[in-house]
Amino acid sequence: MKEYPKDYNGPKSGKSIQEEWIAVRDYDAFKYIRDGVWSYSDFDCWFYSCIEHHRVDAVKQFQKIQNRS
């Protein structure tokens, strides 16, 4: 299992929910990767959560447009 730095209080792979991953800004995700705080599984959780969040928003917007017609 990966050891996170003692001062790290962000989401953790296998322990955090999607909303916690979505709350991480792109810039912070970049820094976590660059600094070696995140492993691939952390990045994967963050990336998947962002994609899923945007997909759900896109579907909702599409449904609103369809309901106006």
Image (cartoon, helix red, strand yellow):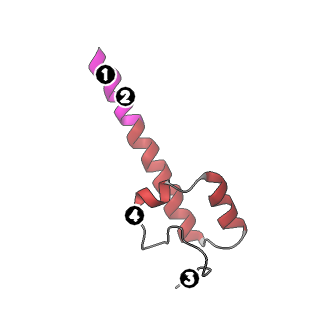
Image quarter where the C terminus lies is top left
**CA gap, disc 1 and disc 3:** 46 Å
Q: What is the C-alpha distance between the residues marked 2 and 1?
A: 6 Å
Helix, strand, or loop for circle 1? helix
Q: Earlier in the sequence, mark 4 or mark 3?
A: 3
In the shown orientation, is residue 39 left or right of residue 67?
right
Identify which amino acid the numbered label 2 is placed on.
Phe
Residue picked out by circle 3: 2
Q: Residue at x 49, y 51 (%)?
A: 50
Q: Which residue is mark 4?
A: 17
Q: Secondary structure at mark 2?
A: helix
Label 4 vs 2, first from the N-terminus: 4
For marks 1 and 4, the one nearer the N-term is 4
Which amino acid lies under the numbered mark 3 shown in the image of this protein?
Lys
Question: Vertical placement of 5 versus 30: above or below?
Answer: below
Residue 55: where, in percent of width, then height?
42, 42
Q: Earlier in the sequence, mark 3 or mark 2?
A: 3
Q: Which residue is mark 2?
A: 62
Q: Main secondary structure of the magenta part?
A: helix
- Secondary structure at badge 3 equals loop
Residue sitting at the far front: 7
Q: Describe residue 64's horizontal placement relative to residue 21 as left or right.
A: left
Residue indicated by mark 1: 66
Q: Position of residue 44 (x, y in %)?
A: 53, 63
Q: Give the amino acid type for the residue marked by disc 4 in the picture.
A: Ile
Place of residue 13 in the rendered image (x, y in percent of width and height, measured from the top left): 48, 72
Q: Residues within 10 Å of mark 2 (few under 14, many from 20)?
A: few
Q: Residue furthest top?
A: 69
* Marks 2 & 1, CB-CB < 8 Å contact: yes
Looking at the rendering, the stretch of residues picked out in magenta corresponds to 58-68
Residue depicted at x 43% and y 47%: 53
